[in-house]
Image (tube, grey):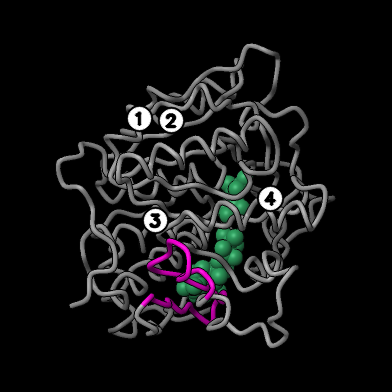
């Protein structure tokens, strides 16, 4: 069996992510537009936070590098991380009066969902390079970076500093592209910073549309996944995963192979959170040394569990829940809506 990435086994933390810690307010009245939605349930959110919670539920030893507001929302996030066994030694508190980012989710139908973001003066984008702990990254087997943190200084520099420490200490780097247009000011700026970061990463995960956004200076008129993936093997990448929603995903590897796994049926409540749970499941499998097909299958099933649930973070499944979901699908017990 091919091993595409290897981890330093003497390190004490499996997985550390850097980026935003926010709040999701998910509409309770589903199948309705936001204009008619009256009540919401509060969860911890932010893509890298969701992935870290997912890894922790899968029994990985996890930590987070980020900045929270000095308010009730910030304290809610901090205590949720602690309750989920996520190390918070590098979660710093802002003292400038910045606020917690809010994501109000609109669930119009299982396939028509959107997110209304409140992200002015958010604490997560104020993390500085000097606040990133080299010591934590040195004892982490994997570092996950997430695109939104690259959108503004000083958080942009904090991510590049984290990449520098990860390279120095032989920490495997995963990049979830997590492209949220509202945080960025121009297509060129977005592509330049995404490309600079991706060039340093061992594993890159994104949707077709996210990779398209990175290709503004390139020729890929057919939007070919193979062309997209090949570019990164000239840099540091060993695995590039390109996701296609319910049509599944393809993992490309530096040995010129592509790997596919089936996706599973789901009784979908909302689509957001699919990518975060997929990432947690996939990376958990990679850390186990499973085949890429197994990693993708596990990620896809984890995604189905989250999209069949109301929340993203709180619904992240355990390993047994994912295995049971796969078994139930294989026995025809779960069908799509
Ligand atoms: N409707 C669906 N039914 C079954 N599986 C799905 C569905 N949507 C997504 N998935 C699974 O989740 C994976 C990731 O989904 P997707 O490509 O939508 O990521 P994403 O756009 O990053 O997600 P997000 O909406 O969280 O940003 C897919 O590869 C697939 O395995
Ligand atoms: O990433 C965000 O800021 C919002 C998420 O927490 C949200 O739940 C989502 O979009 C998941 O992909």
Magenta stretch bounds: 231-254
Which is nearer the eye, 306 or 33?
306
Q: Which tag, 3 or 1, sits closer to the chain's start?
A: 1
Quarter of the image containing the N terminus?
bottom left
User: Contact, CB < 8 Å: mark 1 with mark 2?
Assistant: yes
Near mark 2 (Cα within 10 A), the count class, few <14, some 14-19 or many ≥20, is some
> Left or right: 296 with respect to 303?
left
Residue ranking furthest to the left: 10
Q: Which tag, 3 or 2, sits closer to the chain's start?
A: 2
Residue at the disc numbered 1: 83
Residue at the disc numbered 3: 280
Mark number for residue 80? 2
Distance between the Cα atoms at labels 2 and 4? 20 Å
Q: Is residue 228 above or below residue 99?
A: below
Residue 233: in magenta span: yes
Near mark 3 (Cα within 10 A), the count class, few <14, some 14-19 or many ≥20, is many
Distance between the Cα atoms at labels 1 and 4? 24 Å
Residue 39, percent from left and from top: 70, 41
Kindly identify the residue that appears in the image at 75 percent across and 43 percent down: 38
Q: Secondary structure at mark 4?
A: strand
Look at the image and tell me whether residue 289 can be seen: yes
Q: Which tag, 3 or 4, sits closer to the chain's start?
A: 4
């Amino acid at each position: 069996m091919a091993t595409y990435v290897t981890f330093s086994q003497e390190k004490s933390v499996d997985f550390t992510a850097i980026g935003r810690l926010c709040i999701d307010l998910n509409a309770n009245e589903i199948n309705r537009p936001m204009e008619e939605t009256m009540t919401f349930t509060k969860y911890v959110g932010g893509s890298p936070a969701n992935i870290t919670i997912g890894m922790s539920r899968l029994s990985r030893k996890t930590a987070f590098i980020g900045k929270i507001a000095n308010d009730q929302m910030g304290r809610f996030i901090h205590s949720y991380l602690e309750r989920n066994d996520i190390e918070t030694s590098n979660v710093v508190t802002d003292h400038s009066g910045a606020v917690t980012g809010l994501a109000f989710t609109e669930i119009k139908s299982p396939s028509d969902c959107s997110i209304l973001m409140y992200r002015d003066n958010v604490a997560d984008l104020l993390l500085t390079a000097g606040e990133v702990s080299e010591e934590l990254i040195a004892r982490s087997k994997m570092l996950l970076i997430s695109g939104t943190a690259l959108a503004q200084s000083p958080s942009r520099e904090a991510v590049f500093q984290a990449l520098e420490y990860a390279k120095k200490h032989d920490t495997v780097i995963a990049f979830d592209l997590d492209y949220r247009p509202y945080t960025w000011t121009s297509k060129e700026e977005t592509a330049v910073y995404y490309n600079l970061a991706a060039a340093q990463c061992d594993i890159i995960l994104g949707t077709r549309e996210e990779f398209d956004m990175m290709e503004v200076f390139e020729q890929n008129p057919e939007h070919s996944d193979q062309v997209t993936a090949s570019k990164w093997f000239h840099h540091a990448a060993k695995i590039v995963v390109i996701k296609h929603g319910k049509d599944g995903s393809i993992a490309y590897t530096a040995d010129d192979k592509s790997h596919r796994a089936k996706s599973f049926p789901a009784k979908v409540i909302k689509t957001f959170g699919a990518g975060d749970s997929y990432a947690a499941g996939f990376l958990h499998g990679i850390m186990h040394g499973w085949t890429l097909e197994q990693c993708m299958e596990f990620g896809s099933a984890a995604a189905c569990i989250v999209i069949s649930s109301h929340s993203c973070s709180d619904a992240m499944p355990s390993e047994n829940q994912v295995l049971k979901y796969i078994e139930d699908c294989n026995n025809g017990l779960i069908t799509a809506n």
